[in-house]
Image (cartoon, rainbow, N blue to C red):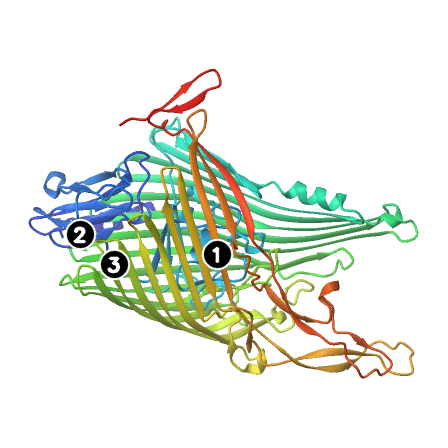
Amino acid sequence: MKSFYSIITIALTLLLQSQTGFGQHRISGFVKDSISQEVLVGAHVIDSTRMKVVATDNNGYFSINAGASSIVNVSFVGYKTARISPNAIGDTLTNVFLSPSNEIGEVVVRHTKRLTHGISTLSNLELQQIPSLGAKPDVMKALQFLPGIQSQNEGTSNILVRGGNPGENLYLFDNVAVIYVNHLGGFFSVFNPDIINNINVYKGGFPASYGGKLSSIIDIAQRQGNVNHIKGSYSIGLTDASFAVEGPTPLKNTTFIVTGRKTFVDGLFALGTYLSEGNDFVMAYGFHDVNGKFTWRPDQRNALSLNLYQGDDYHNYWQRDKSTMGSQKLRLSTTWGNWLLSARWNRVHNQSLYSTQSLSYVRYRLKNGQNYINTDPNDKIDFNSKFVSSVQDISYKWDLKAQVMSNWNLNFGLNTSALRYSPNSIYISSNPNLTSEPAINAFESAVYAENEWEIARILNLKLGARAVHYGTNKYNAFRIEPRANLDIALSSSHSLNIGYMKTNQFSHLLFTQGSIMSNEVWVPADKSISPASTEQISGGWRGIFGNGMFDAEVSGFYKTLTSLSTYAEGYTSLMGDSNWRDKIESGGKGEAYGAEFFLRKTQGKWTGFAGYTWSKAYRSYNGINQGVEYVFEFDRPHSLSLSISRKLNQSLTLSASWVYQSGLPFTPVIGRQLIPSLYDLGEDDPFYYEAFIYGDKNSARMRSYHRLDLALNYTRYTRNGNKAQWTLAVYNAYNRKNPFSYVYTHDMSIGYKVPSPVYNGRKTYDSFSLYQASFFPISPTVSYKVFFGEPKPEGFVKRGKRGIMRKLLFH
């Protein structure tokens, strides 16, 4: 295997080194923060003479072919622009360090950005400025403000992209796929913002290197840690506490970063339910997650990193029947979460060839347990049951980027995954003969190649394909996934784009809508459950104006989906027996189309962005709605979002966000009928139940959803000179009662009620009404965060026995 890699890389090196044109230099390297030496993802390297622009990737790496007399500028929002000379550097690897600045750099570059299409970017700074529930940044909720991305329901972090469902998004954490991405059924995301460098979201036009999901790629780059000194932070909010520590290790050229988060409401839940008068149960819920990354740079060309993530949610319920003097005990427990371990090697072979190899292990599991004990001598019972659903993924990836000629880039590579699915493992003590289907082993492998040509400085053409093989011991599938994108430069500040992609997904997510506890179950494709696939055509315009202050984009898309799977009608879980395939409806079709608008302001006193989406989405299954096409459960035709931020002074920053979405569809009740009871009560007249008669599926809509969030960040310094930040946030500032769900019932004052029984032939019905369930009223929250290990602020001195900090004013 080692000789195989050596032959390929040596051959490519010899080929590529011969392609540099006369009088040109191939400049490659990394763009970094001059203070922390953290890589800057998405920085722009501009050959101002030839008007050529490239952007740094998730590792901060760039490669550009520049003329010997060219002026090359390197820029990044919030940093001073740097200038490098190709003649002075030559064909060598270089590090470009940018200094932070709150002012616009002195160097004015007319072409300041590479106008990419089909990809939305969210920096760590923007993430920190968006108000959220709990007064702490949330990655998934921040993404919901981008056009084409919508929330599943009130308060949740699940996202829906261009008419897709939550299971059709690929979440990459430093290029490793994460299977489960939410806490508390979607109210919090698993990604700790303290470790995030940058987020890229692909909604269409996937590069050939990505596959395996239908709707989007969320590519999250982690930070590497400060190389100069130990620093970090700790914070506390109303629901959880978190910390982050980073810095160099005693080993030469190594850094680390570790973050953690833990709820502290677990004990409060338990204590509150225990002390409540009349309660005979105790309930507790909590979650935790830990991230860690270790990076070693043995030399300028190589970097090796190790990553760890572990996170779990746990919900427990204990009941003790006081009336029987404690003879009966019941415990229900649910645990779900991820493990992730990965190793990664980045190598710059030469100025024209860069590669990344990674090996990873990821496991997601959902576990439900029940234990009931009755110690009464006359009625002894000891009952246990356990349900486990899990997915395990061991993957290897090898990605290469080559600059073949000055106008030709080639990306290619391979990846393979050994997957192990256990959708429905059941144990019931009262039925020991019940057997679960053995775990299903699957292999998914792919090779890809993508060419990128720059033609006459006007056209940028990407043509690629991805060949995928998926197989189990009883099923095999082979798919070719073509990809094509064409950018047309109208000027240095405006461009058009059109793209096409096809991709497949070889596993299906089944989930119960509205459940706080996770009921997410992954099932693999096989003979009876075909792989899902999609084709998408997209296009649009993007422009930069106002001297780079404004960035605008208008785009449209149309996509079809085939071989979709969901729960069959009447089922919301696979638990209960081993025949789980009978509870799945497969062979579904979908259609989605829409238009999106996005405007971002990056300079000035006020910064922020606005987005609007108009879209429609439909589904059809042979066994659902009598095979007639219906509106998708998460279809929201109109979605509008605004996010703004204003730095009032050096200490205060005000942020606000507002979102509007059309109401979700639901199925209305159009009448009632009598259903005879299955039990013989010995009465002269039969006993009946009334049942609702429903209209067309998803033919009505809930009230529209809209909400205003506010946040005020106050930064100060502690007595020891550490920066501290108070965040006061108000969720749903004008207390909008947004619908979470609708329910038809007779009397909401006593809770949800089934349709009323009808006795002795009574022909009258109790009246019923449509009620709205709403959560999350106006919710003020506060958090406090302290940063340590950073340089002391200029003008501050520590005086007095109590260590009071005083500020010296200089003029």
Q: Which residue is mark 2?
A: 15
* Crowd tier of the residue under label 2, counting other residues whose Cα lies within 10 Å: few below 14, some 14–19, many 20 or above: few
Gap between marks 1 and 2 measured at Cα: 57 Å
- Seen in the picture, residue 576 relative to 620 is either above or below; the reply is above
* Label disc, if present, on residue 708 of the rendered structure: 1
Residue 735 lies, in percent from the top left, at 55, 57
* Residue contact at pointers 1 and 3, CB within 8 angstroms: no
Q: Which residue is mark 3?
A: 115
- Seen in the picture, residue 794 relative to 671 is either above or below; the reply is above
Q: Amino acid at mark 1?
A: Leu
Going 27% across and 52% down the picture, which residue do you hit?
401
Q: Quadrant of the C terminus?
A: top left
- Mark earlier in primary sequence (3, 2): 2
Going 87% across and 77% down the picture, which residue do you hit?
680
* Whether residue 198 can be seen here: no
Residue 458 lies, in percent from the top left, at 16, 64
Question: Front-most of 677 and 236?
Answer: 236
Residue 450 lies, in percent from the top left, at 28, 61
- Mark earlier in primary sequence (1, 2): 2
Looking at the rendering, which quadrant does residue 459 occupy?
bottom left
Gap between marks 1 and 3 measured at Cα: 31 Å
Q: Amino acid at mark 2?
A: Leu
Instruction: Report the mark closest to the observer, 1 or 3.
Output: 1
- Seen in the picture, residue 148 relative to 267 is either above or below; the reply is below
* Residue contact at pointers 3 and 2, CB within 8 angstroms: no
Looking at the rendering, which quadrant does residue 211 occupy?
bottom left
- Mark earlier in primary sequence (1, 3): 3
Instruction: Report the mark closest to the observer, 1 or 2.
Output: 1
